[in-house]
Image (tube, rainbow, N blue to C red):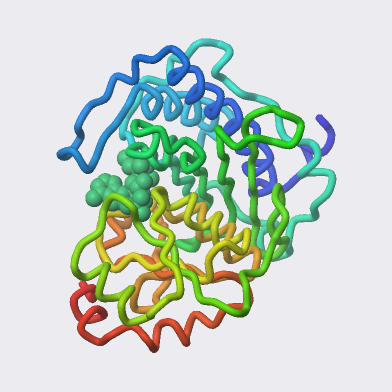
């Protein structure tokens, strides 16, 4: 394993480390819940919470990544944090299975640290976490190269595996594909849209009305909604509102697009993930599963919604 670490290109090493780091952060998130004191703080009102798990998971992730990749820009949702962490929060190993099983695409072989930004959402679905919708909680580590989301991991700390343990990690790299789950196409006889549970408004609803889905899955978390697309539970993720930020969509976009889907704003434009971008995804989110026409869904969204979201 040590040999492959030395020779693997930077992007591959970051993904291989991020798989291990996200697993460790997931354990911290479970431990905070088990202890029972969530330490909830309102960052910007009741719709924007932070818990001890958000804070500790971010410290674990940022401290580990900074030590391994000191010259890479890392931007975490919870802002500047104390990276003097307990020794057992510092993750230094890599996922050998990922490195051994996947070759770096040519387009990513020469990527330099200065071209890269890592976007960290230590706990996506904080509202779900505090209310007990635990399966919807994810840890998101997204990698952008020259502004574009190219790779990432989505870790689900509370996923129940067949062997009875908790947690799974899904990864994706553009040019390789995605792993850690069984890719599934959504049904062909009905149209299912997934959207926010806790951040809805009139514009979100008018976008949904225009698409006239057979079913709407209102579930929290950007990571979890993209999992619905990856696993064939929904055809599209539609959120015609601001509120999500770059750390919410970088990893999900990369994983979804690595598997053949697409994630853009509500006008069909990719977000930029360079180090200078503003954090809010002001123009909403439209994600489509592999095999579903993004353009067809875009065409069905009303001009009034697109104009309102065109900031
Ligand atoms: N108004 C908002 N304020 C803060 N975060 C938001 C807001 N809307 C969405 N988010 C973030 O985007 C994720 C997906 O949104 P939704 O569940 O509404 O679809 C949320 O879990 C939350 O991430 P986080 O939990 O990491 O703060
Ligand atoms: Mg948050
Ligand atoms: Mg989030
Ligand atoms: Mg978060």
Image vertical order of residue 9 relative to residue 86, above or below: below
Picture quadrant where residue 159 is located: top right
**Farthest-out residue, left:** 45
Q: Residue at x 66, y 59 (%)?
A: 108
Q: Is residue 279 visible?
A: no
Place of residue 76 in the rendered image (x, y in percent of width and height, measured from the top left) = 39, 38
Q: Is residue 166 visible?
A: yes
Q: Residue at x 40, y 33 (%)?
A: 132
Name the quadrant of the C terminus: bottom left
Image quarter for ligand 2: top left
Image vertical order of residue 67 relative to residue 153, above or below: above
Image vertical order of residue 69 relative to residue 8, above or below: above
Picture quadrant where residue 272 is located: bottom left
Does residue 149 appear to the left or right of 310 in the view shown? right
Place of residue 208 in the rendered image (x, y in percent of width and height, measured from the top left) = 33, 73
Place of residue 207 in the rendered image (x, y in percent of width and height, measured from the top left) = 30, 75
Q: Residue at x 24, y 78 (%)?
A: 305
Name the quadrant of the N terminus: top right
Does residue 36 appear to the left or right of 48 in the view shown? right
Front residue of 240 and 9: 240
Q: Residue at x 84, y 44 (%)?
A: 100
Place of residue 92 in the rendered image (x, y in percent of width and height, measured from the top left) = 65, 24
Front residue of 278 and 43: 43
Front residue of 41 and 87: 41
């Amino acid at each position: 394993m040590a040999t492959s670490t030395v020779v693997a290109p930077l992007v591959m090493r970051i993904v291989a480390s991020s798989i291990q780091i996200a697993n460790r952060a997931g354990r911290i998130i479970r431990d905070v819940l088990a202890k029972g004191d969530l330490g909830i703080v309102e960052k910007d009102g009741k719709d924007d919470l932070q818990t001890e798990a958000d804070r500790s998971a971010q410290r674990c992730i940022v401290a580990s990544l900074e030590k391994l990749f000191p010259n890479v820009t890392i931007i975490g949702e919870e802002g500047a944090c104390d990276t003097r962490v307990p020794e057992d929060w510092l993750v230094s190993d890599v996922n050998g299975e990922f490195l051994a099983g996947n070759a770096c695409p040519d387009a990513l072989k020469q990527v330099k640290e200065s071209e890269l930004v890592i976007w960290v959402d230590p706990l996506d679905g904080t509202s779900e976490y505090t209310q007990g919708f635990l399966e919807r909680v994810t840890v998101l580590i997204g990698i952008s190269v020259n502004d574009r989301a190219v790779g990432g991991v989505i870790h689900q700390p509370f996923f129940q595996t067949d062997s009875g343990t908790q947690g799974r990690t899904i990864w994706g790299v553009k040019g390789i594909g995605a792993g850690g789950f069984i890719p599934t196409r959504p049904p062909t006889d009905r149209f299912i849209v997934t959207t926010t549970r806790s951040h809805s408004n009139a514009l979100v609803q008018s976008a949904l009305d225009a698409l006239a889905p057979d079913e709407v899955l209102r579930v929290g978390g950007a990571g979890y909604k993209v999992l619905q697309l990856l696993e064939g539970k929904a055809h599209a993720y539609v959120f015609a509102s601001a509120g999500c930020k770059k750390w919410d969509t970088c990893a999900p976009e990369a994983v979804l697009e690595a598997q053949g889907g697409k994630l853009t704003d509500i006008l069909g434009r990719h977000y930029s993930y360079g180090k200078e971008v503003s954090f809010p995804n002001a123009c909403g989110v439209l994600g489509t599963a592999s095999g579903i026409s993004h353009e067809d869904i875009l065409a069905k969204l009303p001009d009034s919604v697109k104009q309102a979201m065109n900031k």
